[in-house]
Image (cartoon, rainbow, N blue to C red):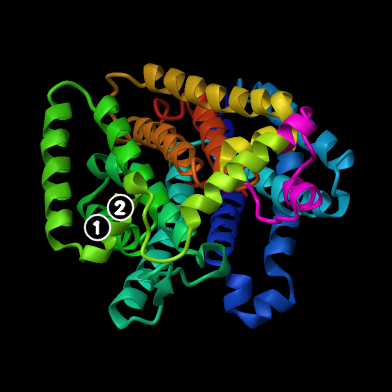
Amino acid sequence: MSTARYQPNRLWVYLTCIYILTWYLQLGLRVGLLGTIRFEFCLGAILSLAAFSTYFSIPEKNSPLFGPVLFLLGIFTCYTLFSHDFSHSWNIYFDRVVKFAMLAVFLSVFVRTPWALKMVVGAFLLAMLKLGQEGFVGWVTGGQVWQNQGIMRLHGSTPMYGHPNSFSGMAVGCLPFIYFLFPTVARIWKCALLLLLAFCAVIIIFTGSRTGYVATIGLGLVFFVLSPGKAKWRYFILAGLIGAVTLAFAPDEYKERFESIFTMQEREGASSETRMEIIHDAVDVYLAYPLGVGVGAFPLVRMEMFGRFQDTHNLYLELLTNLGPVGVIAFFMVIYQIFTVNKQIQKRLLGCRSPDQQFVAAVSKAVVAFIWARLFLGLFGMDTYEIYWWFAIGLSGAMWTIVQLGTTENTVSDHAIL
């Protein structure tokens, strides 16, 4: 078997990294010229053509994710075509479902060696580091902190993460990669991960997001369960110390914000009551339309039925009201398969000693924890059509290919054929 088969096309890997940076940092909004020439769209189009060309030229079989993902895409398509709000559904379908699904294709097709996996994970963490640094500076200077629901809350520097809940969710999503990659990387990258951890801690605390607080606690439990043997108790002690220090030094307004999760009492506003109202309306909408109202169509139907426009603010209600029971099943088939594929990847790499094998295993564990984090965040957020699931699907498919090809065992030169 030719070693060229194992060598990534460096050009497409580099361009995929640029695409990740462009999307997460929203460079089209930051750099006027890039926005004018629609750089993100053009780059995505070039990568799409290259991905489909490459896909049909490689002999490897699809990962077990292929069938469930195709089924979910079919559900999205049907519930767009027959939506109660076709124009809105079409915009979501094209701008989110199709565009984000292509990232999964890029990762699955182009990332075929540990080197390529390191590149794309590095690009993702670099983008997170930049966003975290901007949040940290905005917190120190006060430039990104203003009052929201009775307390001073930190906001993100880009529209995508402008809301405190979204910004906190971004930081929570970084924690699995920091936790699992830390033991596998060189000292300089450990320093970068620790810096990112500091940024994430500031963001999670000072966004005042109860969504982020709940997800962080839930993710902590996942880390405890996934930690092996004696490491569980070392982690438990460390988590306890971090929690105690946080409670000791966090301002009272953020402690009160955390306590309001249980007391339902807020300094200002009535977001808890509003959420309960949304839940009741969502149940009524589902009972009226048990097969679902269509992709993103809940606000319109809610307005028609109750004169209130807000969306579900809950992943699970969004799935149920938008896509019905079939959509819920399709979505969780994909989630189950992500867990299954990564369990198989970790089983294949169990006891492996090489740095590449340890890195792939660490990313696999991080993806599982990342999905758990997003499921926790989904308790208070509408994430059905977001990029997170596709990012995890793409990384899982890439690692499946890496393990099947044995590129962690058959080390070859990084000098790829372009």
Q: What element carries label 1?
A: helix
The reply to whether discs 1 and 2 touch (Cβ–Cβ < 8 Å) is yes
| Amino acid type of the residue that numbered disc 2 sits on in the rendered structure | Phe
Estimate the x, y position of residue 71 in percent, counting from the top left. Answer: 74, 26
Residue 73 seen in the current view: no
| Amino acid type of the residue that numbered disc 1 sits on in the rendered structure | Lys
Estimate the x, y position of residue 368 in percent, counting from the top left. Answer: 43, 32
The quadrant holding residue 293 is top right
Q: Which mark is residue 255?
A: 1
Q: In front here: 95 or 344?
A: 95
Label 2 crowding class (10 Å Cα cut-off): few <14, some 14-19, many 20+? some
Q: Tell me the magenta residue range.
A: 285-313
Instruction: Please check the rendered image and state whether residue 292 is part of the magenta-colored stretch, yes or no.
Output: yes
The quadrant holding residue 384 is top right
Q: What element carries label 2?
A: helix
Instruction: Please check the rendered image and state whether residue 40 is part of the magenta-colored stretch, yes or no.
Output: no
To which residue does mark 2 refer? Answer: 258
